[in-house]
Amino acid sequence: MTMRKIAVLGSGPVGERLANGFLKNGYQVMRGSREPSKLKEWKEKSPPGASIGTFEEAARFGDMIVLSVKGSAAESVVKGLPSDAMKGKTVIDTTNPIADLPPVNGVLNFFTGPNESLMERLQKAAPAANFVKSFSCVGNEFMVEPHFSGGAPTMFICGNDKGAKAMVLEILTQFGWETEDMGSVEGARAIEPLCMLWCIPGFLRNQWGHAFKLLKKERA
């Protein structure tokens, strides 16, 4: 992989966890926020390859972009970026369409329907970018170097561009994941609800230490 500059859009814990993972693996990282000053403390504690800026500054900086903002803000962030700042770039979409409503018996509410996904909306909003869904079906604690007794867990990805997915697969391998490609952007309709499933044990029993793994039957 030749790209070494990563833009991480978002000032929350997901963005911080992934930014730190990229830095640990030798990438240069610029975190972007509507208020870059909120990231000042993170920059001061980070190695020399870390920097901060606005959403646009970070998007222009990165060879690859990681979108890690709140799901309800994702469309406005993407639509607010100049198209040339994202054109041709791989955008790792970590977002989920979580509504601003409390869980119902442990089940999150989504603002999307069953036959659409947030990533499809984002891809339509920025058609020149290559979105790849990833990191959306696990808590941020396990996004980098997920250690489980059952071995490497499975990260499900999807997107329209094969080259972009190959780049994301390489990163996931660096971070300690197995990867399963669920096809084109419509695959996000199945991947995003895994967030609901992942959260249920946490909301019901305060159990948050898990990840998914796809088991395959051995071929004869």
Image (cartoon, rainbow, N blue to C red):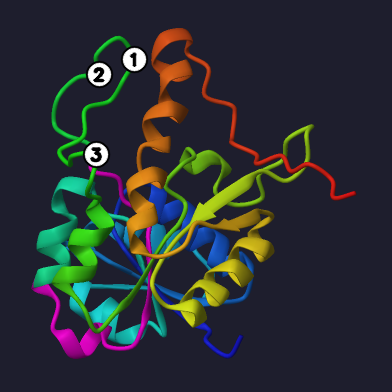
201 left or right, relative to 100: right
- Return the residue nearer the eye: 138 or 29: 138
Which is more toward the observer, 108 or 19? Answer: 108
Q: Amino acid at mark 3?
A: Pro
Residue 193 at x, y percent in the picture: 36, 37
- Which residue is painted at 62% across and 65% down in the image? 24
Query: Mark 3 against mark 1, which lies toward the viewer?
Result: 3
Q: Position of residue 162 (x, y in %)?
A: 49, 78
**Label 1: which residue?**
106
* Numbered badge on residue 114: 3
- Residue 140 as seen in the image, left or right of residue 131: right
Q: Which mark is residue 103?
A: 2
Q: Is residue 15 above or below residue 142?
A: below
- Residue depicted at 23% across the width and 48% down the height: 70
Q: Nearer the viewer, mark 2 or mark 3?
A: 3
For this orientation, the residue located farthest to the front is 220
Q: Secondary structure at mark 1?
A: loop
